[in-house]
Image (cartoon, rainbow, N blue to C red):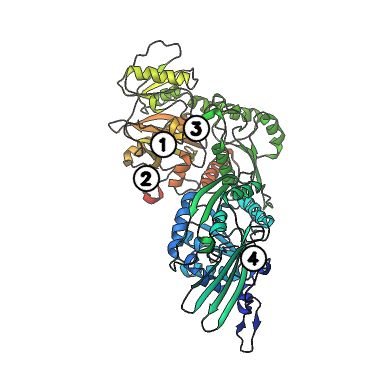
Amino acid sequence: MNNGKTSTGKNHQSNKDSKNSKNGKNGKIGKNGKPQVKVLGPVRDLEEHVPTDWWRRIFTSLYLKTDGDVVDDQKITRYEVDLFSSILKLQPDDKILDLCCGQGRHSLELARRGYKSVEGLDRSHYLIQRAKEQAKKEGLGVRFREGDARKLPYPPDSFDVVMILGNSFGYFETVHDDMRVLREVFRVLKPWGKLLIDVADGDYMREHFQPRSWEWIDKKHFVNRERSLSADGQRLISREIIMNTEKGAVADQFYAERLYNKENLNNILQQAGLSDIAIHGELSSDSQRKQDLGMMEKRIIVTAVVKKEWTPVRRKPKGELRTVVVITGDPTKPDRLKPGAVFDEDDIYTIDQMKDALREMEGYNFIYLSNHDTLIQDLIKLKPKIDYVFNLCDEGFGNDPRKELHIPALLEELQIPYTGSGPQALAHCYDKSLVRGMANEMGIPVPDAILIKPEDKTVDLTFSFPALVKPNFGDSSFGITQRCVVNSSEELLNAVSEIREKFGYNKPILVEEFLSGKDISVGIIGNAPESYTVLPITEEDYSCLPEGCPHICGYEAKWLPDSPYWNIKSIPAELPPETRNLIIKGCLVLFERLEIRDYCRFDWRFDARGNPKLLEVNPNPGWCWDGHLAKMSKFAGMSYAEMLEAIIKAAEQRLGLQPLNGKVEEQAPGKIEEPEEAKETQSVPTIN
């Protein structure tokens, strides 16, 4: 719930609230049918009168009166949702659980803002019914249900985010039960899922709680409060007597909440298995009544991340089940293309996002192989059981980029079908100069360039500065930094030295004329000329860069979060139809000529006069959730999961595998996608 002075939040543990609201705390029904509430009078020890399950009784319509100035104030709710969504960096497609949601104030506000998958759970029957009624009234698709936070009714790995807001953590008599809540949160969060808890600052409350207070809550009701610390000093004990000016006492209730500070919050979260625990300052509430704020006066905001493996999915086969091995890079081995030459948490997160997306595909059993030391033996062992391999190893065998082609070559030797391009295409495209020569021979424009061999002592540039210096072999922008855009012979030699010394590259270096126009990428999924989709062409938006920074999307943009280049965005490219068709035609003829299969990315750039020229071809482009191919797919209205599925379906069609549902889909000979917000009819270029 969204707790207020009652100190109580959202974790309501009973569906008996409607009965309790009729009977009162010690309720009896009088002859006139009205509840009679027994008031105890003065008590010496508040703690003696706190029921173990006080949370079963307290969250009724009276709660929304006593605490409504905080928990039923839209202005406060909007401010809190602004803050929490910013801290969590929420995305519209995130699956969010508002745990102990009370009357759903945060869940409903998130849904109003366009978050598509929001659920709320609370034990209070009364408050959940209120939440459902409000969602129905506003036409919001939030799912509310009653339940116990210690035993959540969700399968493992269900949510991207769980929030426990409004001081709704710490109601139980023992820390053991609080731990049960956190372990359930750990279970239902996906790998890399986030937890946010908004809870009273225990240290502050110990020093500043009001022992006694009273306030009017409306024209007919006022509440008297008493508070004291528990005998062990770990809980704040509260008593509320709610009075009606006409009926007298309508409630005399006792409750207790555990006082967590930053240190013991950190400890209990660690014990529950959560990682990356962070405190995000403090939160204070305001009240229009300007009176007792109780446990809502000063709160701690803490977040944590779940790092775990995906829970194996046990599906009952419905008809045919296709078994696919997914090969990725080896996280236990060095990778010299990455900063620090190691797989870091971002890489593991990327793999987990891929696994999450593939889990959505019905009819498939995916087996993941990443240990390259045992890869050959594993493939031989699995060969009789699998249909094909989904090759997502763009790092290369043993994480050696020069051995990117070794994976498909190995699969060919083992006679195992696989997705993506073969070793020949990968070998050709790894050599930028070779691809330039093939493109030039086919009439596809490329920048002027020269090749510098390691033994060359001098450099004779055949075109004017500025120029771009880059390794001839490699991908992932390896070795390409802002210092690779050079305007003089001295800068050129310095750039060459940096590539050789800093990046340890001792192969030929390509020096191209630097093109200052639009920087665009073209993605294709499928197999030309039979059946393919050209994704919306994207352009790099360099408007975020400080003045003087060269406009390139290089190593800094892909690997260095502290660099201004990290903030470069990809946007749909605005191109004249004839220019777009010229570029697409060039991509399609190269797709066929290089024998590329299933998916590919082509990088182009315009010169100062607006002429497009081919830079590179990547037949095994980054498949990650935030990569260029995923961004293009998103502009076409495809989710990340749908993009991966499209690649798989393209490979299956090429391999002659029948669709799992037995239905053969009609495929257009070629399709050009436009961004969803600006779709227009485009003709498919003819391949000459």
Would residue 578 be found to the left or right of residue 641 on screen? left
For the residues labelled 1 and 4, the Cα–Cα distance comes to: 54 Å
Residue named by callout 2:
682
Residue named by callout 4:
13
Looking at the image, is mark 4 or mark 3 nearer the viewer? 4
Q: Is residue 670 visible?
A: no
Residue named by callout 3:
619
Identify residue type, mark 2.
Gln
Q: Secondary structure at mark 2?
A: loop
Looking at the image, is mark 1 or mark 4 nearer the viewer? 4
Q: Is residue 236 visible?
A: yes
First along the sequence among labels 1 and 4: 4
For the residues labelled 2 and 1, the Cα–Cα distance comes to: 18 Å
Looking at the image, is mark 2 or mark 3 nearer the viewer? 3
First along the sequence among labels 2 and 3: 3
- Check the picture and name the quadrant holding the C terminus: top left
First along the sequence among labels 1 and 3: 1
Identify residue type, mark 1.
Ser
Residue 147: which quarter of the image?
Answer: bottom right
Identify the disc placed on residue 521. Answer: 1
Looking at the image, is mark 4 or mark 2 nearer the viewer? 4
Identify residue type, mark 4.
Gln
Examine the rendered structure and indicate whether residue 561 appears above or below residue 196: above
